[in-house]
Amino acid sequence: MFVAVALVGCADEVPIDRGLVVQTPGDDAVVTSHTAGPLSVAVRRPGTIDRGIVRIELVVTESGDPVDQLTIVATSDMPTMDHPQELDSVAGADGRYYLDVPLGMPGDWRISFDITGPGFSGLPPVDTTLMVRPPSST
């Protein structure tokens, strides 16, 4: 089972590089929320950390409590280009995990998050699509 969310609607744009932006659906810090087994996963608005690289934050909880000691491996892929790359997360505190994702060209980027950890295995992946476009002219 895959959970897929397209970040569309372009109410807000996060600049990344060479006149490109990641389009997001509004001003909320949490872009989308998912369920992976007993876990709740909030994908937070990406922020630019370097040219062409955005940092995605995931907040993972179980029954409202932060879950630490997880391993999150993400795969980013442009389905039309077929060259996926694997990305490892860096754990923060309080159930927060960060992934730096290179988005070097315009198009739709699918990010799939596989989550494992003590007591958590066989969870369905969490899929999100980031849309990289030229900035809107509004």
Image: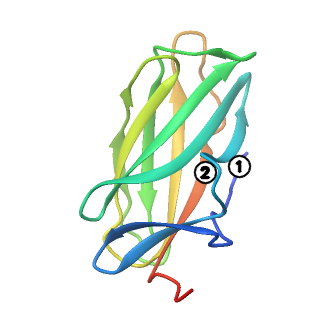
Find residue 134 and report its horizontal and vertical position in percent.
44, 83
Location of the N terminus (image quadrant): top right
Location of the C terminus (image quadrant): bottom right
Say whether residue 106 is left or right of residue 138. Answer: left
Say whether residue 84 is left or right of residue 10. Answer: left
Disc 2 target residue: 127
Check the image and report above or below for 116 versus 134: above
Check the image and report above or below for 63 versus 42: above
The outermost residue toward the left is: 51
Say whether residue 105 is left or right of residue 14. Answer: left
User: For numbered disc 2, what is the local secondary structure?
Assistant: strand
Find residue 109 and report its horizontal and vertical position in percent.
48, 66
**Type of amino acid at the residue the image marks with label 1:** Val
Disc 1 versus disc 2: distance between alpha carbons? 5 Å
Disc 1 target residue: 3
Find residue 3 and report its horizontal and vertical position in percent.
71, 49
Callout 1 touching callout 2 (CB < 8 Å): yes
Residue drawn at (59%, 21%), measured in percent from left and top?
121
**Type of amino acid at the residue the image marks with label 2:** Asp
Q: Quadrant of residue 104?
A: bottom left
The outermost residue toward the top is: 118
Q: Quadrant of residue 91?
A: top left
Residue drawn at (50%, 54%), measured in percent from left and top?
111
